[in-house]
Amino acid sequence: SSWVEYDADCEFPIQNLPYGVFSKRTEDGAPRCGVAIGSKVVDLKALSDNGFFDKTVQEALREVRLNKFMGLGRPAWTQTRETLQKLLSDADGTLRDNAALREKVVLDVNECDLHLPCKVGDYTDFYSSREHATNVGKMFRPNGAPLLPNWLHIPIGYHGRSSSIVVSGTPVHRPLGQTRPDESKPPVFGPCKLLDMELEMGAFVGPGNKLGEPIKMENARDHIFGLCLFNDWSARDIQKWEYVPLGPFLSKSFASTVSPWIVTLDALEPFACFGPEQGANGDPTPLPYLRDSAPGAYDINLTASVKSKTATSEALLATTNFKNMYWSVFQQLVHHSINGCNLQPGDLLGSGTISGSSGPSSFGSMLEITWRGANPVDIGNGETRKFFQDGDSVRLSGACQGDGFKVGFGPCEGTIGATPEL
Amino acid sequence: SSWVEYDADCEFPIQNLPYGVFSKRTEDGAPRCGVAIGSKVVDLKALSDNGFFDKTVQEALREVRLNKFMGLGRPAWTQTRETLQKLLSDADGTLRDNAALREKVVLDVNECDLHLPCKVGDYTDFYSSREHATNVGKMFRPNGAPLLPNWLHIPIGYHGRSSSIVVSGTPVHRPLGQTRPDESKPPVFGPCKLLDMELEMGAFVGPGNKLGEPIKMENARDHIFGLCLFNDWSARDIQKWEYVPLGPFLSKSFASTVSPWIVTLDALEPFACFGPEQGANGDPTPLPYLRDSAPGAYDINLTASVKSKTATSEALLATTNFKNMYWSVFQQLVHHSINGCNLQPGDLLGSGTISGSSGPSSFGSMLEITWRGANPVDIGNGETRKFFQDGDSVRLSGACQGDGFKVGFGPCEGTIGATPEL
Ligand SMILES: [Ca+2]
Ligand SMILES: [Ca+2]
Ligand SMILES: [Mg+2]
Ligand SMILES: [Mg+2]
Ligand code: NI
């Protein structure tokens, strides 16, 4: 345990130490790398300036974003974690007993603004929940097999838009666009009417690979820095009209929200588990390059909630778990690079909407929860929702339950604002 | 005309002055911004160090890539062009008569390595040639209408992979991947067998827009810095198996080749023209946000050629023209931002494969030229091609024909190397 105080329900105990980028609100300071513990942020630049890490680590942690540190790789990450756990542990007086240093290094999170943890060079969104893909198939191809022929062979994914990835708390404008609500009439122009969330997790790439040099499964874990919560906001009406044959485009690129904190694979290791069996019950066995003998899933409890503009409390929309995903982060990574595509530090892999198998309240999008609006959900305050309204605040949460401690991700929230004036 | 010597066939006369990034091969120097004239490169850092531009322009041109300069906007671009045209004109002695300065500033292109002109934050590939979309429709949906219902309403596009964009001359590895050549059997793993080019042009974004603030058509021209040649290498067998329902992914992300030189809109202005009429002959008229009264096309002659490993000369594969494109660069840009998506300096918009209407020799991909391999093309040297083989060097060219001068793009070349070892 740590000399920093927090209770057993805290998402950021000493076992977690997630990475983020913050600035002090009182100063007009540049962003700095930090880790969260309790309600505190540990300033990694201040620790670097005081020589607490190796030289290369210090150089990386003095940057205004985490990309360089992400690029250093697992040995540097693990060393840094060990140093931080030692400095923050009950048994160590280095910071605890040095008020001047502690004041410089340990800040109250309430005095900080949290920023995007890194520059996302490229963002890829996968589609790896079997339940989600099956739900979508049932809705949009009611007469066909719910899963398309390639789905059990390939971790299906598509390139997403990096520039519009925003950190939790950033307002989300309802997008304008083309839709065709009546297929017997021409398309129309206006604000999206079917604004949705997608409850996902994101994986940040570590060192990455050179163009032309695929990453093998046996090395996959050295190339993932950590995970975050990820809301892949989706405009269903725009998506429906635009997405054939080249995939979702403007229906996704208006905003995607990430949690400010990245939980490392080291912190998640106790919660690693096997995902759904592949190649069982008549399913095809993945091709050899995608096979993984180690546990590739993580037991992370996830929720999505909404609070309308006039509501006084949140309504729970869905409860699901990351371990439900058919394709693991490592399979996504290996597939992504198999053609030689180069992945770079800070690149983001979206998991795809995470839906469970226990009915609508385990689904990760309003599309599924309300079954295309057929079954509006009660969100309290005398209100129901098919999709989201202006003023709705949508929040994702995620946490692993350890023995007497939690490892969580902090909030991933966005409030929907009106369409911009044209 | 200029005191730098070149002949009437030269792609880089004083009317062009395309921007790129180079380094001197003899030194181990950092990349620098430059413009091409004749067989020379003008070192813009050296000119900036000598105070030839405004302070903000000089600061931007001292960077190792063009993004900052691209972000300055049209007034800065036009001023810089005027200064360069003056310094390089016959009438001006400033450089011509100052051997010491000239030697610093004007370099032989043969002594330089050319690099990617900018960091591409996000790359989007459009699909804006009606002839190309029609050809693809005829091949893959022989019993349906060749154009999908949305095509004449929307400049269809999808997010591409930024990290694997490479400059002309970079070898292209044949990608590994999953394909399903026999639909009655499981997919197989191995090198792509149907490796193709896509003859495209790319548009580099200038200042861009803030998230949530769409760019209006009346301002579109202030947001495009210039054009390049673009080969969107495509693995047709991987594409066919992976692309439903979320679009092309690994079939495209192994490499995309750009020409080293970006020709500015100012240099292309004399070649602006109207593209195909929209809303004519029963076609739907685009929605108001996409309408443009100014000429949005450019008359740029384009070719694709191939030279096999053992051939002594190139074979011409296709001749087409950029003015064939149904959707203009400006319509693509406006559509891209209509949902509030933020575009940033250096973002790249691929035009989509540029096919003409004069039969196979005007088509921009081997898929179309050979009609899925049904009609192999003779490439001389006793060889034919359905798709490309290892060792093939594929080159795109593009030039506008002025009155006694040309405005060209230089080569956009890539040679196909073997699949990487796994
Ligand atoms: Ca998604
Ligand atoms: Ca293309
Ligand atoms: Mg999104
Ligand atoms: Mg490509
Ligand atoms: Ni990108």
Image (spheres, coloured by chain):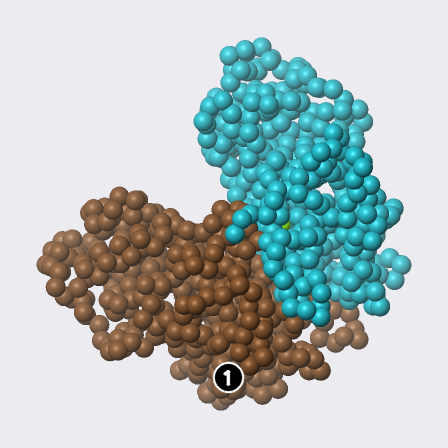
Chain colours: A cyan, B brown
Q: Relative to A248, say whether A66 is above or below.
A: above
Residue in the image at 33% along x and 47% along y: B60
- B281, B325: nearer the viewer: B281
- A281 displayed left or right of A210: right
Residue in the image at 80% along x and 75% along y: B184
Q: Quadrant of residue A308?
A: top right
Residue in the image at 67% along x and 79% along y: B145
Q: Relative to B115, say whether A231 is above or below.
A: above
Q: Position of residue B83 (x, y in %)?
A: 22, 56
- A270, B412: nearer the viewer: B412
Residue in the image at 22% along x and 75% along y: B7
- A124, A369: nearer the viewer: A369
- From this viewpoint, is residue A309 visible? yes
Q: Position of residue B366 (x, y in %)?
A: 55, 79
Q: Relative to B50, say whether A400 is above or below.
A: above
Residue type indicated by callout 1: Ser
- B157 displayed left or right of B144: left
For label 1, the residue is B357
In which chain is the residue bearing label 1?
A: B
- From this viewpoint, is residue B170 visible? no
Q: Position of residue A133 (x, y in %)?
A: 77, 57
